[in-house]
Image: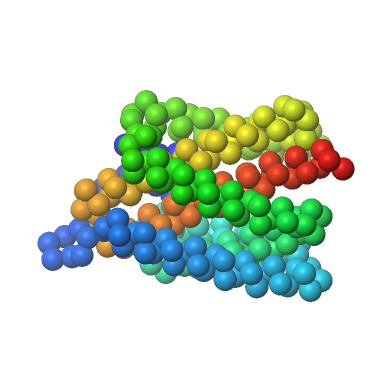
């Protein structure tokens, strides 16, 4: 069972519920996913308001991103902590996304709302396609998405490391045709990762994973949604900057 989501790897559901222990269900995972998304929106709105009031958004973006990363790593390494760390991750991630979105929206009004709507629309379309059987998470499909996601990760890592030496990978971060095509490809790959997450959650229920895995699986889904939103926002930024 493959998934490119770092929070949901092959060994995630190797732990099974013991006799008498509640087990993970799809419905329970859906409910907890809604809770996490609500937490993201609540702190994102507060962070957005702070930005529009003239607050120092740079500090908020950096601090919340670091805290979200720390809590996210703790959740990934200790799934049993997920009932506590997943909500904390959602709160910190909301602060980060709110500050980032407020900063970007100040440059191009309305762009953050467009990104939110496109992310929600993409999520619903992929969920419907998956539930209807239009898209199936076959082994070849999973292998292709994992490979593509890994390649994108390597490109981003190389870009990050080279940035310390004042070197940029040409074209992909610009608003030219190549940069826009690159962003489109990344958005598609990020969206298709949702299919792997849906499949993984179903496998968790089928394998009788313990109840706390509902929080962990919801956290993994949230990681993908955050990535998708950021990539859509970057794509919209490139398109908007071409009109300047």
Picture residue at 73% right of the left edge, 56% below the top: 110
Q: Give the image location of residue 88, x and y in percent.
A: 50, 68
Picture residue at 53% right of the left edge, 40% below the top: 190
Judge by depth and name the residue closer to the eye, 7 or 94: 94
Judge by depth and name the residue closer to the eye, 216 or 101: 101
Q: Give the image location of residue 162, x and y in percent.
A: 73, 35
- Quarter of the image where one finds residue 158: top right
Residue at the left extreme, as displayed:
19
Picture residue at 77% right of the left edge, 35% below the top: 174
Q: Is residue 115 left or right of residue 198?
A: right
Q: Give the image location of residue 42, x and y in percent.
A: 57, 71
> What colouring does the structure picture have?
rainbow
Q: Is residue 81 above or below residue 200?
A: below
Q: Give the image location of residue 244, x and y in percent.
A: 87, 43
Picture residue at 66% right of the left edge, 63% below the top: 98
- Quarter of the image where one finds residue 16: bottom left
- Quarter of the image where one finds residue 219: bottom left
Please say whether residue 36 is visible from this viewpoint: yes
Q: Is residue 129 left or right of residue 241?
A: left
Q: Is residue 239 left or right of residue 127?
A: right
Q: Is residue 50 above or below residue 107?
A: below
Please say whether residue 85 is visible from this viewpoint: no
């Amino acid at each position: 069972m493959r998934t490119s989501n770092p929070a949901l790897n092959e060994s995630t559901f190797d732990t099974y519920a013991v006799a008498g222990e509640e087990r993970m269900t799809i419905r329970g995972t859906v409910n907890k996913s809604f809770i996490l998304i609500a937490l993201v929106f609540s702190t994102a709105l507060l962070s957005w308001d702070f930005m529009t009031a003239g607050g120092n958004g740079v500090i908020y973006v950096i601090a919340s991103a670091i805290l979200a990363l720390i809590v996210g790593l703790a959740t990934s390494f200790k799934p049993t902590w997920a009932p506590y760390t997943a909500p904390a991750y959602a709160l910190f991630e909301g602060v980060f996304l709110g500050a980032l979105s407020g900063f970007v929206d100040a440059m191009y009004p309305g762009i953050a709302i467009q990104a939110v709507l496109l992310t929600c629309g993409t999520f619903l379309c992929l969920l419907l396609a998956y539930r209807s059987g239009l898209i199936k998470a076959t082994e070849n499909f999973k292998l292709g998405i994992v490979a593509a996601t890994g390649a994108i990760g390597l490109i981003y890592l190389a870009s990050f490391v080279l940035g310390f030496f004042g070197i940029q990978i040409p074209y992909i971060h610009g608003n030219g045709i190549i940069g826009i095509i690159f962003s489109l490809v990344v958005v598609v790959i990020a969206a298709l990762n949702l299919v792997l997450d849906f499949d993984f959650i179903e496998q968790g229920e089928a394998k009788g994973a313990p109840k706390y895995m509902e929080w962990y699986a919801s956290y993994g889904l949230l990681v993908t949604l955050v990535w998708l939103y950021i990539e859509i926002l970057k794509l919209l930024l490139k398109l908007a900057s071409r009109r300047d």
